Amino acid sequence: MSGMRRVPRSPHGPVAIATSPWIVVGAGVVVMVVLLIVALGAYRGRSPAPDGAQPPALPVPSAVVAPSLPTSVPSPVPALPGISGRASGLPPSAATGSPSAHPTVGPTGRPTATRSPSRAASGQPAMTGRYRVAQSFDGGFIGEVSMVNTSARSRGWTVRLEFSGGRLVTAWVEGVPQGTIRQSDDGFTYVSGVDVSPGGSVSLRFHMERASHTPRECTVDGLRCDGL
């Protein structure tokens, strides 16, 4: 018995792992391979969005437009032109056309709202006119044509004045809406903006520069004016 040799036993448990490090390295490699396979499977299971796809747009509320409120525009009040010896143009009220509905001037000077032709049906003079110089000053003068409606109807009127030279500065009718002025080389024509009632009167005034005080022609509705 004493001559027999005892064979040493191989270590087990932690001692065997410590003495064999390749076992630890192999187990780590296996774990890494398993984790990589799981990650690849999870990535392939996802369904990527197709190219060019855009996220759905959020609904945009339509704009609310407030209703427009009507704006009241006051009717223009005709301005009465003044008299100036240095005026160089026509007033806006005299250069514009006559309104579609014209009031008439009664004997008391108050306008009414009727309209009729400017001549009597019988062909007799309906409007008579008289010319005079209302004011004279250096370089010009203020002329006036006074008219009376001798007919039985309210009617408009047209005055034609011609001068040898000179220049018209402005023309107007005081206190009523203005008519229309048409200028020419030798004078001007004024078409009334109001009618004159039966027996009523109205006066047209005008400012001339560098002209004779006596016109070459003065007519009311084609009939020669008195006072020349």
Image: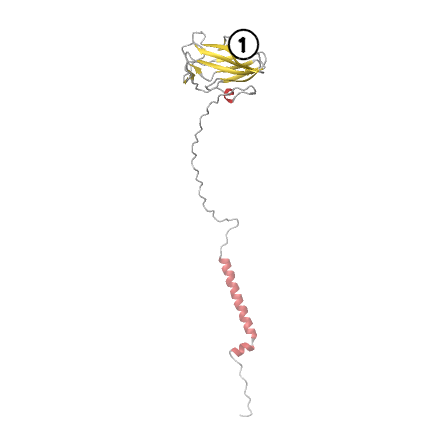
User: Nearest the camera: 191 or 14?
Assistant: 191
The x and y percentages for residue 95 are: 52, 20
Q: Is residue 175 left or right of residue 18?
A: left
| Tally of marks | 1
Q: Which residue lies most toward the bottom here?
A: 2
Q: Identify the amino acid type marked 1.
A: Glu
> Is 85 situated above or below 152?
below
Res 166 quadrant in image: top right
Q: Nearer the viewer, residue 99 or 103?
A: 103
| Residue 125 picture quarter | top left
Around disc 1, counting alpha carbons within 10 Å, would you say few (fewer than 14), some (14 to 19), or many (20 or more)? some
User: Vertically, is 100 above or below 7?
Assistant: above
Image height check: is 85 above or below 44? above
SS under mark 1: strand
Instruction: Give the residue drawn at x 52%, y 63%.
Output: 37
Residue 33: horizontal and vertical position, in percent?
A: 53, 66
Q: Which residue is mark 1?
A: 217
**Residue 207 horizontal/vertical position (percent):** 54, 16
